Image (tube, rainbow, N blue to C red):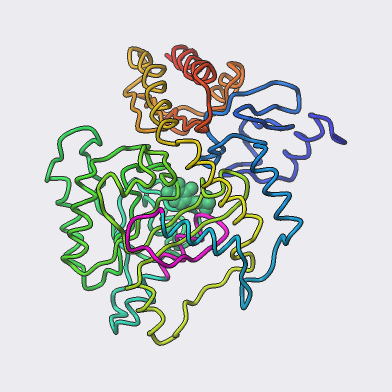
Amino acid sequence: MALSNDDILAGDLAHVWHPYSSFLTPSPTYAVRSAKGVTITLADGRELIDGMSSWWSVLHGYNHPRMNAALAAQAEQVSHVMFGGLTHEPAVTLCQKLVELTPAGLNKVFLSDSGSVSVEVAMKMALQYWHSQGRPEKHQFLALKKGYHGDTFGAMSVCDPVTGMHHLFRDNLMQQRFAEPPNSNFYGEFDEADLESLKEQLHHHKQLAAVILEPIVQGTGGMRFYSPVYLQKVRELCDQYNVLLIADEIATGFGRTGKLFACEHAGISPDIMCLGKTLTGGYMTLAATLCNDKISDGICRGEAGVFMHGPTFMGNPLACAMANTSIDLLLENNWQAQVSALAARLSEGLEPCRELAAVADVRVLGGIGVVELHQAQTLDELQPAFVAEGIWVRPFGKLVYVMPPYVMSANELATLTQGIYNVVSRLS
Ligand SMILES: *Cc1c(COP(=O)(O)O)cnc(C)c1O
């Protein structure tokens, strides 16, 4: 490499924005040289076992021979063409796979660049649908508090109003409706009282285009695992009040919660579904918005006659080829066994944290492990402490959480959970 570790970090500090970052009080940042399997190698030579899967996205590990070969092969064929008037095998194969694997009824696929954009697309689909039905007044969305759906304006408008800092963007943000999130735990009894806030908001159904939620796992907004019965009831209420249901499976898709899609825990099919993050196994940026025929027919029979969206890099062949290969690997690798092994080992490895003074709760669902602390922490001390343990974990607020690549071995996972225990045990 031409730049030394120090050069990279100095240049980074001077010019490069990171997610939710400040140039005045930068948080600890590490330069990466390479990554292979579940190990990230830093430019200074240190090796870290990756507990974050690069924000849920890596399934089969870094630098995977099959993925690399498919990427090179696709580059030899075609790296990119515009999707207006042109199509190609990687995109068609991917859309067929997605229709086949996702809940029944989802039959049309819109490919885009990132999760946030797929949420924008989902919201636009819902709005254009109601417009086509002669109901343009159904223009608001009902979302759950503690939810997270992305950082663009439409997506931001349905994120938790407090953590999404809605007041900062008040004059530019669409005004949406919010219900209290369910308290019934994934593993416990369902409490009907959880539905009260949602039902109250559904009184405004004449203005509501859709309910948008993360099925089963509220991710970035709190790592909460809620009852499948709640999701079933939301589907029933949406039908009853003639409101569409958008399932944001960007974090939960492709097996992470122990089902291929989290909606399957409740046996429901949404009208619109968003996929992203894991879609390409962490190789390329790609997202998809699926909808059923009711939505696509409505949109195409409406005033515009077309769906009003079309990103430049829509259906990028390299990204589609990575998604196809990742899905093939997922199915060949027996992901159910991989994820249930992860679940068992995460439980075993993290459960001892429950006894620690700083810890409020430990919970595991599928390939997701969470240690919730009593007090929010800053990254300044925690991040270097995890790195010193040889693991890559990036906590936020009170939440120390991991969602390892599905291929992580028992030994690697033991290092990861022991490292978390060691760091958390030192918190007062
Ligand atoms: C990450 C995430 C998004 C946003 O995806 P980006 O690719 O970061 O734009 C939206 N919804 C959920 C549930 C997510 O976890």
Q: Give the residue drawn at x 34%, y 82%.
A: 132
Residue at the far bottom: name it. 303
419 over 136 or under it: above or below: above
Q: Quadrant of the C terminus?
A: top left
Q: Residue at x 16, y 57 (%)?
A: 199
Total numbered badges shown on the rendered structure: 0
Residue at the far left: name it.
192
Q: Residue furthest right?
A: 2
Q: Position of residue 128 (x, y in %)?
A: 39, 76
Q: Residue at x 50, y 40 (%)?
A: 332
Q: Is residue 361 above or below residue 356?
A: below
Task: Tell me which segment is drawn in magenta.
Answer: 101-124
**Residue 343: in magenta span:** no
User: Where on the picture, by quarter, is residue 100?
Assistant: bottom left
Q: Up-down: is 45 above or below 325?
A: above
Residue closer to the observer: 59 or 5:
59
Q: Is residue 121 magenta?
A: yes
**Which corner quadrant of the image does residue 344 belong to?**
top left
Decide which of 217, 159 is in the foreground and name it: 217
Image quarter hosting the N terminus: top right
Q: Nearer the viewer, residue 29 or 370?
A: 370
Q: Position of residue 241 (x, y in %)?
A: 18, 67
Q: Is residue 64 left or right of residue 224?
A: right
Whether residue 164 can be seen here: no
In the rendered image, residue 386, in percent from the top left (x then y), is placed at 56, 21
Residue 405 shown left or right of residue 273 in the figure: right
